[in-house]
Amino acid sequence: MLGKLIKYEFKQMKFVLLVTAIGLAIITGIVICLGIVPMWIFGRNDIITETLAIFLTGISALIYLFILFVAGIGMYIYIGVRFYKTMYSGIGYFTNSLPIKRHELILGKVIPAVIIQTIVTTMIIASGALIFFGYTVSKDGFEDLMLNIARLTGVMLSDSGIRNLGIALGLTFVGISSIIQMASIIMTLFLSVSVGQLFNSNRILMSVIAFVVMNRVFSAIDAIIRFIIEVLVDKAYRYNGSAFNLIFMILTMALNIIILVICYTVSYYIIKNKLNLE
């Protein structure tokens, strides 16, 4: 039954995923046409061409960053709204009457949401990579493309503290950490919606307030952990940015897993014992 519920959620969310993919493809194409193609065609030796290219690139970058913000944050908002509508609004009567266990009901909502958000994040990364490749080729040519990619990858892994793990293992580590973080955020959304439905009025507002409060609390805990690490960790590691960041990433993953478990447990309790449908 869990598999059928997951399949149904994917079917209901595929339109939003398709719209997001089309939107990212369009904005990526616009950025490439405005900021990269002119440099590729005319080169950057001419002052007027270079000035125009810089201007168009700046405008394109602003538009691109705005679209990325909308795509990333907007998907979380959509997921939260969908949680509320399918679990606690009028549709919730049908959802909660299904002959399935409560944990299957929660997982049937959360798992597709995590996968969809992962796909959106992957599309955003692919879009950024395509623009980076295009900019590098237009500026330095194909001969320096692989060199710039290697440099960028090395800098990213070095800043995150996992360079010594190697590219494949390092990227895998970052990917797993990112998925755990997304799952933690989505489960926090689910819990905030569950808390909001406990009220008899202004449920959406209370859900938003609950999410903001929980997010601030978790951020404060995260800051406290970082402070404790800085105090307790040996100076040799503290001044070694890579080692310090790696330690912090591992502890952040552990914190996200704890948050995930707590939010799941409380949500399960609310759905089982404190259900308050509209």
Image (cartoon, helix red, strand yellow):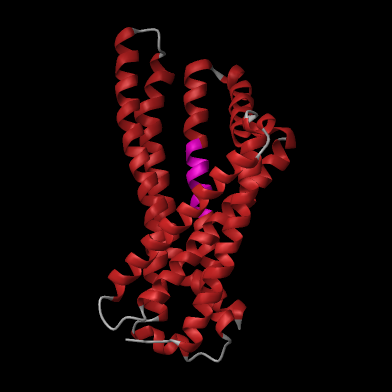
Image position, residue 195 (x, y; %): 40, 75
At 32% from the left edge and 8% from the top edge, which residue is drawn?
47
Q: Horizontal placement of 137 versus 43: left or right?
A: right
**Looking at the picture, does residue 200 appear above or below residue 244?**
below
Q: Which region is colored magenta? A: 119-128
**Is 36 or 212 nearer to us in this picture?**
212
**Is 276 or 41 nearer to us in this picture?**
276
* Residue positioned most to the left: 202
**Looking at the picture, does residue 22 appear above or below residue 62?**
below
Question: Does the magenta segment cover residue 263?
Answer: no
**Looking at the picture, does residue 176 appear above or below residue 13?**
above
At 56% from the left edge and 65% from the top edge, which residue is drawn?
260
Image position, residue 74 (x, y; %): 37, 56
Predominant secondary structure in magenta? helix
The quadrant of the picture occupied by the C terminus is bottom left
* Residue positioned most to the front: 231
**Looking at the picture, does residue 254 appear above or below residue 11?**
above
**Is 24 or 273 nearer to us in this picture?**
273
Is residue 182 visible to us here?
yes
At 59% from the left edge and 32% from the top edge, which residue is drawn?
159
Question: Does the magenta segment cover residue 127?
Answer: yes
Q: Horizontal placement of 223 versus 278: left or right?
A: right
At 59% from the left edge and 63% from the top edge, which residue is drawn?
258
Image position, residue 111 (x, y; %): 56, 68
Image position, residue 130 (x, y; %): 50, 35
Is residue 161 visible to us here?
no
The quadrant of the picture occupied by the N terminus is bottom right
